[in-house]
Image: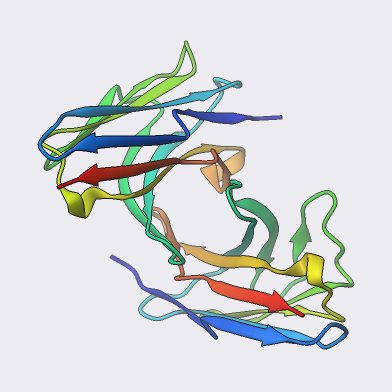
Amino acid sequence: KQEVTQIPAALSVPEGENLVLNCSFTDSAIYNLQWFRQDPGKGLTSLLLIQSSQREQTSGRLNASLDKSSGRSTLYIAASQPGDSATYLCAVGSGAGSYQLTFGKGTKLSVIP
Amino acid sequence: GAVVSQHPSRVICKSGTSVKIECRSLDFQATTMFWYRQFPKQSLMLMATSNEGSKATYEQGVEKDKFLINHASLTLSTLTVTSAHPEDSSFYICSSRDNAAQYFGPGTRLLVL
């Protein structure tokens, strides 16, 4: 059974800092990995999707890497802003058609102005 | 990107009543929709996979007679929590997929008194 762990559970940084969020998974037989953002009481916004054959994806100030063999992914946020404050979820797609998503518990990020 | 809506966004009900949550894909047809549940500070857990025109597939430990799922059209899936109890209070999120990715609804907060 796939298990996804995110460290740290919470993180507080001053505005402008670069930061890294970590995600690890137990079964390396994955189809893809996604990073999501969840604002309080809201649904999920997809940030980056990395296919199993890829090593990284970039979107603006966000960069996600994937090391499938070691079961790890990182989300790098450059020049953090208060608007980045949210919970960041890592989800691993496995099973036929990558329809089965297994989520981590998330990292709650607070960017202090 | 694709848009998924949910209704209602928040519902409070008395113990023993039934609650229906709607999930709609607004700009694409979804043959498959997913229902997740998220307890506070926990990860999203897949409850069931809803297939248009056929019976839903439930994850282990999810009671199919308690959580009734109907996916009668390509744009609408409903989740009915029957005889709700306080322990059913949670955040319910649906998602639907196209060939590219999964898209998540904004979620429904259920509070059972």
Instruction: Relative to B40, say whether A23 is above or below.
Output: above
Residue A71 x, y percent position in the rendering: 49, 18
Compare residues B12 and A66 and report the one nearer the observer. B12
Q: Quadrant of residue A3?
A: top right
Residue located 23% across and 49% down the image: A84
In the image: residue B8, left or right of residue B103 = right
Instruction: Relative to A35, say whether B76 is above or below.
Output: below
As drawn, the residue found furthest toward the top would be A70
In the image: residue B23, left or right of residue A86 = right
Q: Quadrant of the N terminus of chain A?
A: top right
Compare residues A40 and B74 and report the one nearer the observer. A40
Q: Quadrant of residue B85?
A: bottom right
Q: Quadrant of residue A111?
A: top left
Residue A101 x, y percent position in the rendering: 56, 44
Residue located 58% across and 46% down the image: B43
Instruction: Relative to B85, say whether A33 is above or below.
Output: above
Compare residues A68 and B110 and report the one nearer the observer. B110
Residue located 20% across and 54% down the image: A83
In the image: residue B56, left or right of residue A66 = right
Residue A9 x, y percent position in the rendering: 47, 34
Compare residues A95 and A69 and report the one nearer the observer. A69
